[in-house]
Amino acid sequence: MAAPTPHGVPDGLGAAAVPPDLALLLRDQLEAVADEVEEEVRRQVPEYARPADGTYRAHLRAGVVQALTLFVDHIADPRGQGAAITTTYYELGRGEALEGRGLDALQSALRVGGLHAWRLMGRTAEELGLDSSVVAALGELAFRTVHEVAEAAAAGYAEARLRSTDELERRRRRLLDLLLSDPPASPEAVQDLAHAARWPVPRQVAVVALAATADRREEERPLASAGALVDMGSRPPRMLVPDPEGSGRFGGRAFTLALRGRPAAIGPTVPLEEAARSLHWASRALGLMGRGILPRQGVVRCADHLSTLLLHSDEPILARLRSQCLAPLDSVSEGQRGRLAETLLAWLLSGSNVPDVAARLHVHPQTVRYRLRQLEKLFGDALHDPDARLDLILALRAESLHAQSLRAPSPGPRSPGTESPEANSSLTAATKSETFMNSRP
């Protein structure tokens, strides 16, 4: 890219005052002056004092010669732009940015070199007996020269910084796509692109799937993205976190706040080559969050909900399991179905212990026994068959999660006696229920 034309410095300063043949005389001295200016810059600017770095020193020499040449060219033709030479400084500025350095050293070198060159040129002007108007014109041209090359270097630096940032982001998005590809990319391809993206390759990663909410801009990046690979343009937006159990450890509430309140699901921690699996489960969890099966807000960790994820990994099979195993409940009312299903699941999970079920459901043990008699009539021997019990647990768990996704937040604990028909059941019925419980294998 060509260097921009400098602004803010008038063209043709001192054009009438400077003798045209002075340019020929100064051009003859250019190499000698360049030697002194280069030495002065290396003495005063530590960044350029690199005797063992031939390339860096060659760049310094070229920059000095180019600046002095531009100065002499302005004497020969005060209206000349010196585009080729300012382009050199544009590239020098770009080079500083691409090497990860700032412009301070280059700007210091321009100040030191410009001042020293002006002293040497001024000495020559005195030796030639030039009057003060010529010396003043030379000073204006020297100022113009330093301004032009400094502005060109700054423009090159800014352009490279912008392009470097954009290119780095592009490379990191490509790397993220590569890491999440299925089947996984070769380790060599990952290493090469990671090196180009300046991303240290970790052993383990976790992928975070972020909710795409309507009231937030999708380009708004999470604050917790240092070291992470982020793509807010994908659906869902995703973030790959390196070393999640170590330096990239998820920080609980701090991590939630860093996501700017955006709901998210954290996939399981996996080896790098299995990143696509972490994304798969994070996306699955995010979908369950949207349906209310998992908490809708905050950050959900797949590691804390493995059984729910497994249960919903094949929805058609799950629907068939619920339909088949819970068919006996189709014969009761909707209200009874919910209470009986809740009681049966609690009974199966508590080892068939009635007091534990009562405590879990916040009802009287007699209420539990009443419901169990109903369940015995509906399910019969299936309640005592190990295989059937496992199927029932899975089906009832799915039923519970489905109901949870449909209803409002759960009400407070129920007190004993709120279900009057059950609470007022006879002692004889309770005794029969106890007999049933005690006769269980």
Image (cartoon, grey):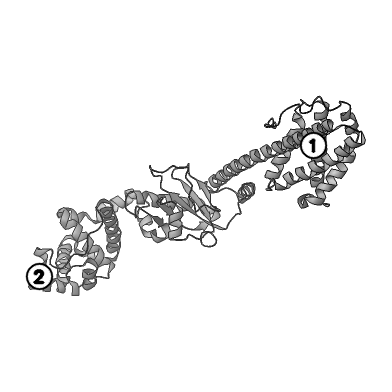
Q: Quadrant of the C terminus?
A: bottom left
Q: CA distance from mark 1 to mark 2?
A: 106 Å
- Compared across the picture, whether 86 is left or right of 437 comes to right
Which quarter of the figure has residue 121?
Answer: top right
Q: Would residue 273 appear left or right of 264 to someone viewing this image?
A: right
Residue 343 visible in image: yes
| Residue 398 on image: x %, y % | 29, 56
Residue density around tag 2, few if under 14, some if 14–19, many if 20 or more, within 10 Å:
some
Q: Which mark is residue 421?
A: none
Q: Earlier in the sequence, mark 1 or mark 2?
A: 1
Placement of the N terminus among the 4 image quadrants: top right
Determine whether the residue tagged by mark 1 lies in a helix, strand or loop.
helix
User: Residue visible at 82% across and 39% down?
Assistant: 118
Q: Nearer the viewer, residue 243 or 109?
A: 109
Q: Secondary structure at mark 2?
A: helix
Residue 384 can be seen, yes or no:
no
Q: Looking at the picture, tell me which residue is in the foreground, 265 or 186.
A: 265
Between 160 and 190, the one nearer to me in the picture: 160
Q: Which mark is residue 67?
A: 1
Q: Amino acid at mark 2?
A: Ala
In this rendering, the label closer to the viewer, 1 or 2: 1
Left or right: where does residue 81 sit relative to residue 39? left
Front residue (pair 322, 301): 301
Residue receiving disc 2: 429
Picture coordinates of residue 158 (x, y %)? 64, 40
Q: Position of residue 259 (x, y in %)?
A: 45, 52
Q: Check if mark 1's residue and mark 2's residue have beta carbons within 8 Å.
A: no
For disc 1, the neighbor class at 10 Å (few under 14, some 14 to 19, many from 20) is many
The residue furthest front is: 132
